Image (cartoon, grey):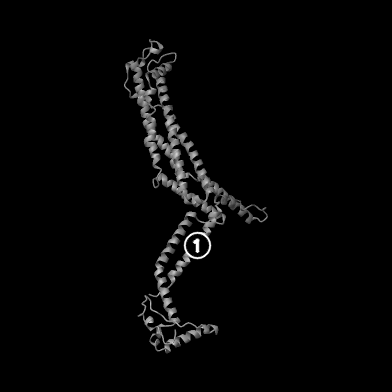
């Protein structure tokens, strides 16, 4: 400043009031710069100026570049401290997002064969548990099987309309045909059997339909279980192989269920409950009149009573099959699917592992054994765990970012700020 002027009013805040106090500094002159006067000497001269100048002597303790640096540093520290909570929140949220995305992408593939096998087994167990959860009601879908037994199967049995199978003409035809060349003297037993068998054989249709419907529901649950197994999204080949193995198991179970279920129907057709007929009231007219013509041997009233008797017996059998067929389906399909859906798949994996271990042990036991490819099993397992290279690179990048953010979080939390 020119001689004879001062900035006391400004520095003391009377001329221009600021939110932060004024701080006066003495910079190097152009002559000092030309003479290469260093900053240390310049600061010393600055301090001497404020201490020796009468106008500024009372302000010397809060003037100068050094004081300015301290004030600015303290202000910067307070600004940073005020930003730390939001910064910590941002870092914490970013860490959660990165962890969530890494979890969605899945764990990295193990390098060794044993690790690969363990990973495949764990993914399969997760899928299998989700499938069981659907059946047990923990997850939705399994209740559809109950609907088959409680609604669809009984409705299919009702649609058979056995009374239409037992029309007067049909009964007369089968009863008279059963007489053969000589009419029955007491009762047309063979006719009864043919009528009953003709009705019961129609139950095979609803029985097979129940088996197929439950099979379809189980297949849908396999698809839902695969969609619910996050790890399978990471390995498309394993997803395809696992799904195919599960469906193949269901196919075998369906065939066994169909055999067992139709066997129940055939058993009812093959052996009639005698006590049912013994308890029927005896009728003097039941034997018919052998003197009448072949097609007029039994009167209509008697044929209607035969139809009624057969219908009662068939309904009784249907009542039993309505309960036993669902039991057969559940035992052969639902229960078996819960118990051994992936047994064949696990067995194949086990064979690969045994093969690998045997080859390795054989080489260790005898060094003269010709070299074998110990990596073949690893390649087979690796083929199940093949992954998109882009996903692998994405996982690496996310892991690095996560490491950096965690490091930043630790450093911020470790800083001891002055209160």
Q: Is residue 198 above or below residue 383?
A: above
Q: Is residue 231 left or right of residue 141?
A: right
Q: Nearer the viewer, residue 287 or 109?
A: 109
Q: Quadrant of residue 113?
A: bottom right
Q: Position of residue 276 (x, y in %)?
A: 35, 26
Q: Is residue 135 visible?
A: yes
Write the residue at 52% across / 45% down: 240
Q: Is residue 416 visible?
A: no
Q: Is residue 398 left or right of residue 316?
A: right
Mark 1 nearby-residue class (10 Å; few <14, some 14–19, many ≥20): some
Q: How many marks?
A: 1
Q: Quadrant of residue 110?
A: bottom right
Q: Where does the N terminus fall, quadrant-wise?
A: bottom left
Q: Position of residue 190 (x, y in %)?
A: 42, 20
**Which residue is label 1 attached to?**
401
Q: Where does the C terminus fall, quadrant-wise?
A: bottom left
Q: Is residue 55 above or below residue 80?
A: below
Q: Position of residue 289 (x, y in %)?
A: 36, 12
Element assignment for label 1: helix
Q: Position of residue 198 (x, y in %)?
A: 42, 24
Q: Nearer the viewer, residue 320 or 201?
A: 201
Write the residue at 42% across / 45% down: 134
Q: Nearer the viewer, residue 88 or 264?
A: 88
């Amino acid at each position: 400043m020119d001689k004879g002027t001062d900035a006391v009013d400004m520095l003391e805040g009377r001329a221009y009031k600021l939110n932060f106090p004024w701080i006066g500094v003495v910079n190097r002159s152009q002559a000092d710069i030309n003479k290469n006067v260093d900053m240390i000497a310049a600061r010393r001269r600055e301090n001497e100026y404020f201490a020796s100048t009468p106008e500024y002597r009372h302000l010397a303790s809060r003037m100068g570049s050094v004081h300015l640096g301290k004030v600015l540093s303290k202000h910067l520290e307070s600004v940073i401290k005020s930003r730390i909570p939001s910064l910590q929140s941002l870092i914490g949220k970013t860490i959660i997002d990165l962890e969530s995305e890494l979890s969605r992408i899945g764990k990295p593939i193990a390098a060794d064969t044993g690790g690969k096998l363990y990973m495949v087994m764990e993914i399969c167990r997760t899928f299998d548990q989700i499938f069981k959860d659907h059946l047990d009601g923990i997850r939705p879908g399994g209740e559809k099987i109950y609907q088959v037994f409680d609604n669809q199967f009984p409705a299919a049995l009702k649609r058979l309309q056995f009374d239409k199978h037992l029309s007067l003409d049909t009964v007369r035809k089968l009863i008279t045909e059963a007489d053969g060349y000589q009419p029955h003297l007491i009762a047309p037993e063979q006719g009864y059997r043919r009528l009953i068998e003709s009705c019961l054989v129609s139950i095979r249709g609803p029985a097979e339909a129940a088996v197929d419907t439950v099979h379809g529901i189980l297949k849908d649950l396999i698809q839902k279980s695969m969609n619910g197994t996050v790890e399978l999204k990471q390995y498309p080949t394993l997803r395809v192989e696992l799904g195919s193995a599960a469906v193949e198991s269901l196919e075998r179970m369906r065939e066994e269920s169909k055999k067992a279920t139709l066997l129940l129907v055939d058993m009812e057709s093959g052996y009639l409950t005698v006590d049912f007929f013994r308890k029927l009231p005896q009728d003097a007219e039941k034997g018919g009149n052998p003197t009448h013509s072949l097609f007029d041997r039994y009167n209509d009233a008697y044929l209607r009573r035969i139809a009624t008797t057969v219908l009662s017996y068939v309904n009784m059998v249907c009542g039993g099959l309505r309960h036993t067929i669902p039991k057969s389906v559940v035992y052969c399909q639902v229960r078996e699917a819960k118990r051994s859906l992936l047994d064949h798949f696990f067995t194949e994996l086990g064979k690969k592992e045994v093969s690998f271990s045997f080859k390795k042990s054989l080489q260790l036991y005898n060094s003269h054994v010709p070299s074998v490819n110990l990596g073949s099993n690893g390649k087979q397992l690796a083929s199940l765990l093949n992954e998109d290279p882009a996903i692998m690179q994405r996982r690496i990048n996310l892991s690095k970012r996560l490491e950096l953010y965690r490091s930043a979080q630790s450093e911020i939390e470790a800083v001891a700020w002055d209160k």
